Image (cartoon, rainbow, N blue to C red):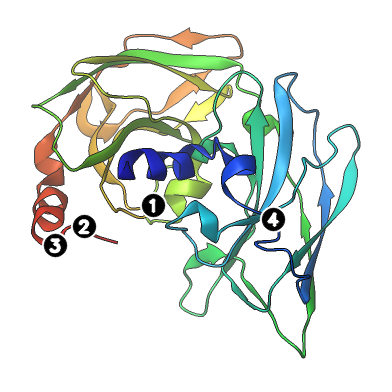
Amino acid sequence: MLKQYFLIILAAAALGASCSGDHGLAPQPGRLVVDVIFRGTPPTTTQGIYLIVAPQFPPHAINELYHSSNSLPIDRDSVRAVIDLPYGHYDAISLWWYSNETKSNLADVLALPIVQDTAGVWQPMSFDLNRNTPSDYVKLYPDWRKVNRDASLEGTITFSGPFPKNTLATAIAAYAYEPKSNIEYLIYMSSIDFSIGTNPYKYKLPIRAGTISYLVVLWLPERASMTGFTELGFYQDPASPGIPLKLKIKSGETRTGLNIHADWSNAEQAIWSTTRRGGRE
């Protein structure tokens, strides 16, 4: 049950049914006003886009999220969205894209504004609502090209052994740049597929044409946070083992033969810690 619940968060497939825009019938005292300025043209597979506000990022439960009750209009260049919220601190604002062909996932975050903190670390842009500051305003600049996936990657993932009992999700993900921090696992993500469940696993990953700098197998243990990934293996340069191979993919291309060995020894610490402590952040 826990696995199914968390995967709903990852896939955001039950947004309208499982979380509430107002979290109750009483009017909310705070308000966020968002001007959305679109770039490009929405893919023909677009079902809608939703404004998401997270008091805690990454969220640990879907009922922590606030969202627009309906999809924002997608047939115009810009739109203003207003969402009523209780007073409090909010860690992140984002726009999620929904396809009418596939389930939405982490790679379908169409906009996630980030800022650099005093330590030089990039974090989602946060805001606070209170009696003195009951409203806030932000502009978002989503680029439709991010979700216009006109190419694909194919290969076989071979695991070094059986899946651990505390496996929550295993995924193949493509990145425009190699991620070095938790937040970069989200903002650099071009595409991800969480459906891995067999060994070996043959995958076909839709992507947007361009450069893929990092193709990696990711694992999440039970009770992990949304960015608590463990890397099991990545696609390496055959001429330089241990170095990621950058892929330049043309529109309409399907690149095949991208096989990856996934080593469970890379996840031993997470497997051990969740077994001992009954989960991790």
Find residue 274 and name its label: none
Number of numbered markers: 4
- Residue matched to label 3: 277
- Give the distance between the C-alpha atoms of the residues marked 2 and 4, in whole angstroms: 29 Å
Q: Secondary structure at mark 4?
A: loop
- Give the distance between the C-alpha atoms of the residues marked 2 and 1, in whole angstroms: 15 Å
Residue sitting at x 74%, y 51%: 68
Along the line of sight, the residue nearer the viewer: 178 or 142: 142
Q: Nearer the viewer, mark 4 or mark 3?
A: 4
Say which amino acid is labelled 2: Gly
Instruction: Give the residue at the far bottom of this rendering.
Output: 132
Say which amino acid is labelled 4: Gly
Q: Are marks 1 and 3 in contact (CB under 8 Å)?
A: no
Neighbor class of circle 1 (other Cα within 10 Å; few <14, some 14-19, many 20+) is some
Quarter of the image that includes the C terminus? bottom left
Neighbor class of circle 4 (other Cα within 10 Å; few <14, some 14-19, many 20+) is many
- Residue matched to label 4: 21
Q: Is residue 35 above or below residue 86?
A: above
Q: Can you give x and y, in whole percent of width and height, for residue 106 in the image?
A: 50, 40
Find residue 279 and name its label: 2
First of labels 1, 3 by sequence position: 1
- Give the distance between the C-alpha atoms of the residues marked 4 and 1, in whole angstroms: 24 Å
Q: Secondary structure at mark 3?
A: helix
Residue sitting at x 53%, y 37%: 107
